[in-house]
Image (cartoon, helix red, strand yellow):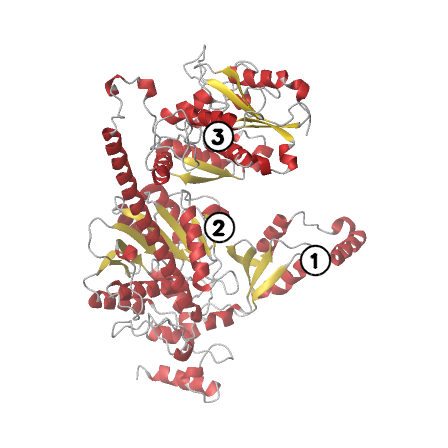
Amino acid sequence: WAWLPLVLLIAAKMEQVGGRNYLDLARTDNRLTRLPFFGGGVGHLLRYLHPLAINPASERGAQLWKLNFNATRGSSMAEREEEEEEEAGEERQVVASPDAQFNEVVALFGSEVWNINQDGIDILIEQRNVADARKFMEKVGFSYNVMIDDIESAIDETYVEVPAVEHPLDSVRNNSLPPGSLMSWRRYHDQADIQQFLQTLLETYSENVELIQIGVTRNKRPLEVIRVSNGNPDNWAVFVDAGLQARDWLSPAALTYAISKLTHLWGRPKVKGQGQRAEKAMRRIDWYFLPLANPDGYQYSRHTDRLESGCYGVNLDRNFEYGWGGTGSTSNPCKNLYRGAESFSEPESRALRSFLSGMREYLGAYVSLGGYGQAITYPWGDADYTARRAVLALRRLNQAEYSAGTSYRQKLARPGNSADWVQDRIGPQMVFNMFLKDQGRYGYLLPPHYIVESGEEVFEFMRTIAQQHNEMITQKTHLLMLLLMGLIAACLANELPSNLTQLDVNEIPQRYDEAQLWRIYNISEAMQHRVPVGQMLEQKFGGNIWKENSKDQLKAARSFLSAHRLDPQILSHNVQAMIDEELIGGIEATSMAHGSRTKKSARSSMHWKDYHDLDTIYSFMREIRSKFPNIVRLYTIGKTEQGRDLKVLRISENPRENKKVWIDGGIHAREWISPATVTFILYQLMSNWENQPAHIRGLTWYIMPVMNPDGYEYSRTTNRLWRKNRSKSRRAQCNGVDLNRNFDIGWNGYGSSTNPCSDTYRGSSPASELETRAVAEFWRSESTIWKRI
C-alpha cells in the first residue's frame, strides 16, 4: 500500500500524455528520454514524476546570449540615435562605452555570466528579462547572438542517451571496458556509476591501479582518487581533477573516458596491426585522477537544480587560499562565485590541500579540467611551450581550436582557484587548467555525443605532458653526458687551469639558480598613469627582474604588479638552466661541426653554431681584410679601460662618394646574439661580394661587431647576464656604465638611472666612457664623408 500513490501518479502521467509509454515521459514536448536513467533511485524518479516533492528548478524560456566584443554600431542605428537625441534631449540615456554597455546589460538583465572569452561574454538571461533585454540591445545598437533560445530544452538534451549505432567510440575503446561496468559515455552518468567504474578498474587492473579515499564531503560522499602506475618509486607524478563546478558534467565524463583508455592500453602488448598501446612516456608517470572533485554538487545538479542556483554551497574553485577574496569572487552566498566564509572552508578543498601537500616532493604536474571555453591556461611560469604544443596536438587530433596563455589573459580574474594555489604552494613544474568544449554554443549544457571527442582531447593533453616530461629527462641525461665528456676532454688536453686555488673571488662565475625571467603584459596602461614600472621594481625588489632570489620578494613583486593591473608571466623559473642549455648547445653543435672546440688561433675558426669569444671575432675581421685588401680597411678606433681594442671594419669601393651604412652590435654585454648576427651579416656580405647587386656594392659599410669588448668578455667568463662595460666607479663599489645610455642626445632622460649599481646607469656625464667617446670621435672624424641615406 505504501507504493499505491506512486503507482497512481504514474498512471495519471500516462493518461496525460495520451497513453504513451514511460520512455516518452520528458518535461518537454519533444521525444527526449530522461526517465530510463534513475541513478539516484526513487528520489531521482520523483524529481520528474512529482515536481512538488523535490521542487526542481526550472529554466523554461531562459536564454543564453553572447555579447560580442568586436561589434560596432551600424550607420542606420547611429542615425536613429541622432533622431532620438533631438526628440528626447537630455532625457535619453547614452551608454558611454562598450564596457559600460556590457556592465549595464549584465546588471539589468543577466542572472549570471557563464563565460568570458575572446569573442565576448556569455550571459544567462532569465525569461522575464528577455523582452526588455532585446529592447535595450536594439536601443544601444550592440551586437549579440542567442546561443540557446530555451535553457530548459537544452537541459533536457543533456539527459538523452546517444544511440549505440551513432556512438563515436574509436576502435581502441571497443570491448575495452571490464565486465560489469556501467559506464558507456553515451550519456552523463550518476555519481554512483562513476564510483562503481573506479571500483571495477581496481578489480580488473589490480597490478597497476590503486584507489585512495582522500576525504569525504559534507553529505559523506567519498572523494576517491585513482592511481595508475607501474610502481617505480622514481616516477614523476601528475595529478588531474575534474568537476570542481557541479554543473560541469563534461569534465568528469571526459576524464573517466581518458582513464579507461589509459588503463586499457597500459599493459597491452605492442603487436603490429593490433592497435596502439600506452606510450612508454605515459607509463613512466604515476597518474593520480580525481574524476569527481565535487560529488555533492554534482548529484544536486543532476536531481534538483541543473545550473546550481540557490543560497547554499560554495564555489570550490574560489575557495583556495591563493588570492582568496579578490575580484572575481563574491561574499554573497546566493551567487555562484561565492568564495566561502574563509579559504579552505570546505571539506573538498581541504582534502585536496592535504593530499597535494603530501605530494610536494614528487608532483611534476597538476591539471584541473573544467568547462568551458576550449582553452589551456597556466597561472604563471614557463609552461607556454607545453600549452602551445598541446594546442597543436589537439588541432591535429580532431581540428579542435584551443587557445593558450596565462589564466588572467584567457579567463580574467579567478581568485582562490586551485591551480594558482598549487603553483604557489606546491610548485610543480607544470600547472594547467584545461577548459573543455565548447566555445559558447551549448556552454555548460553540452549534449552527451561530445563526451568521447572531449575524452580523446583530455587523453591527448595527458600524452603531451608525458612526452614533454620524457624529453626533459632525455635532455638532462644528455646534458650530464656532455658535461662529463667535456671534462674528460679538457683533462686529456691538459687545458684545466693549473692555479684553480689562486682564482680571484671576483672572477668566480656567478650563477643564477634562483633567478627568474619575467615578461610583464599591459605595461602601457600603467605608463599612461605615470607609473614607472621598471624603476619601481628595481628600487623595491633589487637589481632587476632577472634576479629575484627569495619567495618573499617574488610574492611582493607579484602583489605590486597586480596592484597596477599588470600581468606577469614567468618565462623561466631557473635562468641558470637557460645559461647551461646555451653553453651545452654550443658545445654540442661545435663538436658536431668541427670535432672539438679549439683555442684561439692565428686564423679565425668562425662559424655560427656557437657564440665566439672576442679573439675569434677579431681574427675573422682580419681574415676579411686579408681577402679583400683593396676594398676593406680595419680600424682600431680606441681602447677600452681594460686595454682591449675597439675595431671597426670599413667595406667600400668608393668611400668618398658612396652613401654610408653603420652597423654595430654588442653594446650590451649579455646580448651575445647581437655580435653573432653582425658577423653573420659581414660573412653574407663578403662571401659573394663580386656578385652582390649594385645597390649593395654602391654603399660604404662600417661594421663594428662588438662595441663593448670588456663587458662581452666578462659576460663570457664571469657573469652571463652582465649588461654594462667594466669601467670602475670612483663613488661606488658597483662597476660599469650602460653604454646605450651614455651618448649625449637625450642623456639623463627617462629610462636611465643615476644609480651606479643599476643596469641602466648612464654614467657621470655624456660620453664619459672610452667606448662611447671613441665611437663619437670616429663619427666626427668621418663627418666630411657621411651622407644621409
Give the residue displayed 39% in from the left and 61% down from the top. 251
Examine the rendered structure and indicate whether residue 767 appears above or below residue 391: above
Examine the rendered structure and indicate whether residue 441 appears above or below residue 541: below
- How crowded pointer 3 is (Cα within 10 Å; few <14, some 14-19, many 20+) is rated as many
Q: Nearer the viewer, residue 651 or 614?
A: 651
Which residue lies under the disc numbered 2? 411
In the picture, the disc for residue 675 is 3
- Inspect this view and state whether residue 660 appears: yes
Residue situated furthest bottom in the rendering: 19
Disc 3 or disc 2, which is closer to the eye? 3
Which quarter of the rendered picture does the C terminus lie within?
top right
Which residue lies under the disc numbered 1? 139
Residue 664 position, x and y percent, is 54, 27
Give the residue displayed 29% in from the left and 55% down from the top. 281
Examine the rendered structure and indicate whether residue 606 appears above or below residue 182: above
**Mark 2 belongs to which amino acid?**
Lys
- Quadrant in which residue 382 is drawn: top left
Tell me which numbered mark, 3 or 1, is placed earlier along the sequence: 1
Residue 84 position, x and y percent, is 77, 55
Tell me which numbered mark, 2 or 1, is placed earlier along the sequence: 1
In the picture, the disc for residue 245 is none
- How crowded pointer 2 is (Cα within 10 Å; few <14, some 14-19, many 20+) is rated as some
Residue 495 position, x and y percent, is 27, 26
